[in-house]
Amino acid sequence: MFEQSINIERMEQAVALFGSFDENIKLIQNEYLVNVVVRDSELKVCGEPESVAKAIKVIDSLLTMLNRGETLTDQNVRYCISLVNDGNEDKVKEFVGDCICVTSKGRSVKPKTLGQKKYCEEIKNNIITIGVGPAGTGKTYLAVAMAVMAFRTNEVNRIILTRPAVEAGEKLGFLPGDLQSKVDPYLRPLYDALFDMLGAETYQRYVERGNIEVAPLAYMRGRTLDDSFIILDEAQNTTPEQMKMFLTRLGFNSKMVITGDITQIDLPNGIRSGLKDVTRVLKNIEGISQVVFSEKDVVRHKLVQQIIKAYEKSEEARLKR
């Protein structure tokens, strides 16, 4: 049985590292079949040499996160494990500690994966950024955070969030109320992100001043959007014509972020997705960036990653038939 030790500077570090009911350490022990114990100021890892080496790398990565003020969660412990398994443990420092903005409740919004870090950097450095990936990768939430940061630092005067009002198995006409009431359910995720960043009262004040607009994609037609941060969400449900219309709304001193998941297209059969088209048509154009997320960038419940993998395998098997 091989044993290796890590020095723990403070007992608070050990408490945070182990987590509630030792849940963080149990994840590492179950992954590598090692035993982890604390003796005095040392943390000892016992097991097969290769497994111990990987467990030590995960623990070192987690300690780096703790030293930079991060709170350990099930998600980021699992992500560190996946980085070590891929041989990328040295990249932990690349995304730890960067705060995009602070929410209305004082919580820091930070990238939690390498994919999210790259996404935020591309939004910052490009005029148009296209983010494509599965649910739970933070595409919309981080785009809204970047928009709020740009607004707070006076880089833009307006935030405009839009979505195509596509019927996903439900009929829009049967929803109660006027047109705005009918489309509001489609825009709810955008409202939720803004409420979280700004607070409901501040959000409402900016809406009344015209600094923030949340509207269906159809409302964008015929406009030129200057000094604005514009986010098109659920872009997989646009047609190529709608996508072209949206892109040509771009005005001076504006940014655009387009997000979507090409595995969740709700368009009628036979209609091409504007998101699929735009990733091909706008390839290699300066000022336009494309970021593709994977299931490793999912920051929701661990089962979401497994669900995405299962569907990917199912689709691959179907295409081989």
Image (cartoon, rainbow, N blue to C red):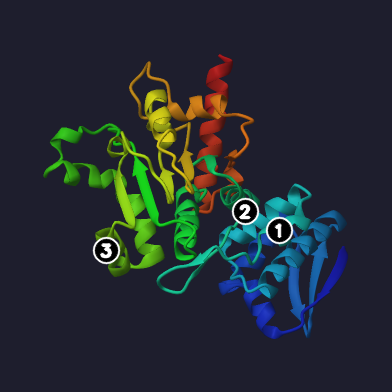
Image disc number at residue 204: 3
What residue is rendered at 63% in x and 76% in y? 16
Location of residue 12 by image quarter = bottom right
CA neighbours of label 3 inside 10 A, class few (<14), some (14 to 19), many (20+): some
Q: Amino acid at mark 2?
A: Lys
Q: Which residue is mark 2?
A: 117
Q: Which residue is mark 1?
A: 94
Q: Could you tell me how far apart the alpha carbons at marks 3 and 1 are, in whole angstroms?
A: 36 Å
What residue is rendered at 53% in x and 27% in y? 314
Tell which tag, 2 or 3, sits nearer the viewer.
3
57 in relation to 107, above or below: above
Q: Quadrant of the N terminus?
A: bottom right
Q: Nearer the viewer, residue 100 or 192?
A: 100
Number of marks drawn: 3
User: Could you say where residue 208 lies in the image, as x and y percent from the top left?
Assistant: 24, 60
Mark 3 residue element: helix
User: Could you say where residue 67 lies in the image, as x and y percent from the top left?
Assistant: 70, 74
Q: Amino acid at mark 3?
A: Gln
Q: Could you tell me how far apart the alpha carbons at marks 2 and 1 are, in whole angstroms?
A: 8 Å
208 in relation to 188, above or below: below
Reading the chain from its start, which is encountered first: label 2 or label 1? 1
